[in-house]
Amino acid sequence: MTSSARPLGVYVHWPYCARICPYCDFNVYRDRGRADEQAALVDAIIDDLTAQAELTGPRTLVSVFFGGGTPSLMAPEAVARIIETACGLWTPAADLEVSLEANPTDAEASRFAALAEAGVARLSLGVQALDDAALAFLSRDHDAAAARRALKIAATTFPRLSLDMIYARPGQTPEAWGRELAEALSYGAEHVSPYQLTIETGTAFDRAVRRGRFTPPDDELGAALYDTTQAVLEAAGFEAYEVSNHARGQAARSRHNLVYWQGLDYVGVGPGAHGRVTVDGARCATEAMARPAAYIARVAESGRGFPGLEPLSPVEAAEERVISGLRVWPGVTFAEVAPLGLSPDHDRIKGLAEEGLLTKDNSRLRVTPAGRLLLDHVVRRLLV
């Protein structure tokens, strides 16, 4: 494969949110009173992209993903500028995927047409729930009626629609979750990311649990909710092509996420964005300055938003392949994880296969359906 044909993804982090969700541990900031900073940030993102294009050299651009934060709060003209810049710096693939995350508030739904006009073809809508009590518990900025309105608008505005849903909420039953998920599917999305609510350290939910304000579902109920998720989606024609991602057909799979899971290169721009790029044959990590002002200053000073490239050792690169590659069904080849000393005859591989958590495959390392349920456990044992 020539250097110009090597695929590349671009991740754009827009860190502003109208409200900070209590379960979120991402790099986010309140949206209010930051108009001047946001205008400067758009310019910095474009300058950072330009500088990183010199670093990567010619590539085929396969995806541009706007995440956050809440990138649907961006001015559509800014979204268009960034897309145009990326497509001018690298060669766009014929099937280039341009995705943007959005919340289903009425204010954001009113901008969907302008965002589509700006070049967004795939919307990832953070519905999270279709129940008012659950949305209040999650401190979302929308209610169930607004979510339904946004779903209808998005389904007719964008060629591709993905939904994010959260389950394993306190008091939720498998039966109620099954009905809720089925209703969400009825609006025509071709991709669904159902996430089990996890309590991340340092979040507001973490503090609430430690203070006894609510108790997450136990493992048995969590497993029942997971099984319900799989059953409802499978019956609706969705394939679980990744641990938390389901698509109705191969074309509906998230191309950007596959960049991560397949170990391809991606450029990260925006405050706190991570990237992985191959430079002079070495896979390198990048991590942009986290605070918007610091990121803007770093770009003004050096052209790029991160302090420097961090070359990964062969062992570190192989560990990343295990962590990300086992999330998808094809897994990873044993050649990719050779620096870890893993092979079909390794005791850890044999043990996990005997427990039914890994497939018995002499060419690839991959988990079974049972292994997917215990993926963190499998990865920890592999990387001891």
Image (spheres, rainbow, N blue to C red):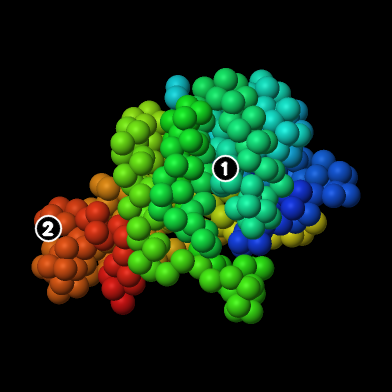
Residue 107 picture location, percent across and down: 76, 34
In the rendered view, does 215 fall on the left or right side of 51?
A: left
Confirm or deny contact between disc 1 and disc 2 (CB under 8 A).
Answer: no
**Residue in the foreground of this view, choosing between 177 and 344:** 177
Q: Nearer the viewer, mark 1 or mark 2?
A: 1
**What amino acid type should be assigned to the residue bearing mark 1?**
Leu
Residue 102 in view (yes/no) = no
The numbered mark at residue 130 is 1
Height in image: 232 above or below 110?
Answer: below
- Residue shown at 49%/57% (left/top)? 172
Vertical relation: 12 (above or below) 251: below
Q: Is residue 89 left or right of residue 48?
A: left
Q: Residue at x 80, y 49 (%)?
A: 31
Amino acid found under the numbered disc labelled 2: Lys
> Which quadrant of the figure contains the N terminus?
top left
Element type where label 2 sits in the image: loop
